[in-house]
Image (spheres, rainbow, N blue to C red):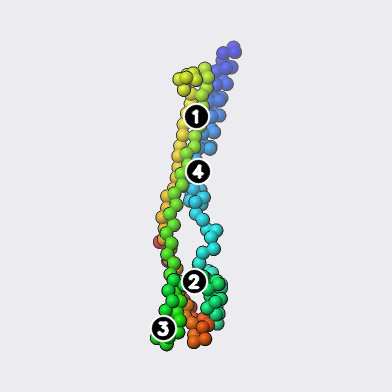
């Protein structure tokens, strides 16, 4: 009778280990993408331009909000024009490997033989995207913002 109980316990252990393998094996690809994308930086965005830049601002105020422009030139009337041209490539790769390997003494081998139950699974995600933002700020003769425009794309 004791032998049947011992065998029954081994099968229960196998079922429990199998359930643990299935439930905790791997994370989804969308989880990996969310883990590697960093949106916490204070980067220039269309929303920032819309919220912060106003007609009548001085060049110093614009520089404080957006930083230094990439290009500074003049228009046909010799008024200053600042151009912010930002291009970013986002590359992300994440992978995980999960699983369970268990040695059950007396079932499927011994310590030296490495017998037992095992299994593993892996998942991952890779992504590349590009985004652009061009902001053009036109100043009047007094060095104040007279007009501004922007264009953004993501692909």
- Residue at screen point 56% across, 76% down: 61
Task: Count the numbered circles shown.
Answer: 4
**In this rendering, the label closer to the viewer, 1 or 4:** 1
Q: Where, by quadrant of the figure, is residue 85 drawn? A: bottom left
Tell me which label, 4 or 2, sits earlier in the chain: 4
Tell me which label, 2 or 3, sits earlier in the chain: 2
Considering only vertical position in the picture, is 40 above or below 102? below
Tell me which label, 1 or 4, sits earlier in the chain: 4
Residue 75's label in the rendered image is: 3
> Residue 119: horizontal and vertical position, in percent?
46, 31
Name the residue beneath numbered marker 1: 101
- Residue at screen point 49% across, 71% down: 68
Q: Secondary structure at mark 3?
A: loop
Estimate how packed mark 1 is, as few (under 14), some (14 to 19) or many (20 or more) residues with alpha carbons within 10 Å.
Answer: few
Tell me the distance, in whole angstroms, between the alpha carbons under discs 1 and 4: 18 Å
Q: Secondary structure at mark 1?
A: strand
**In this rendering, the label closer to the viewer, 1 or 3:** 3
Residue 68's label in the rendered image is: 2
Tell me the distance, in whole angstroms, between the alpha carbons under discs 4 and 3: 54 Å
Q: Residue furthest top?
A: 1
Q: Nearer the viewer, residue 28 or 143?
A: 143
**Residue 146, visible in the rendered structure:** no
> Residue 57: horizontal and vertical position, in percent?
55, 80
Q: Quadrant of the N terminus?
A: top right
Disc 4 + disc 2, Cβ < 8 Å: no
> Residue 80: horizontal and vertical position, in percent?
45, 81
Disc 2 + disc 1, Cβ < 8 Å: no
**In this rendering, the label closer to the viewer, 2 or 3:** 2
Name the residue beneath numbered marker 4: 27
């Amino acid at each position: 009778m004791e032998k049947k109980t011992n065998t029954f316990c081994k099968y229960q252990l196998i079922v429990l280990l199998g359930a643990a393998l299935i439930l905790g094996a791997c994370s989804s690809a969308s989880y990996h993408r969310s883990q590697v994308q960093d949106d916490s930086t204070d980067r220039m965005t269309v929303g920032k331009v819309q919220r912060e830049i106003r007609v009548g601002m001085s060049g110093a105020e614009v520089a404080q909000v957006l930083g230094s422009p990439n290009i500074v030139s003049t228009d046909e009337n010799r008024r200053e024009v600042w151009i912010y041209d930002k291009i970013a490539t986002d590359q992300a790769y994440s992978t995980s490997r999960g699983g369970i390997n268990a040695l059950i003494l007396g079932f499927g081998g011994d310590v030296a033989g490495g017998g037992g139950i095992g299994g593993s699974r892996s998942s991952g995600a890779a992504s590349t995207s590009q985004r652009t933002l061009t902001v053009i700020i036109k100043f009047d003769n007094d060095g104040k913002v007279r007009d501004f425009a922007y264009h953004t794309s993501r692909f």
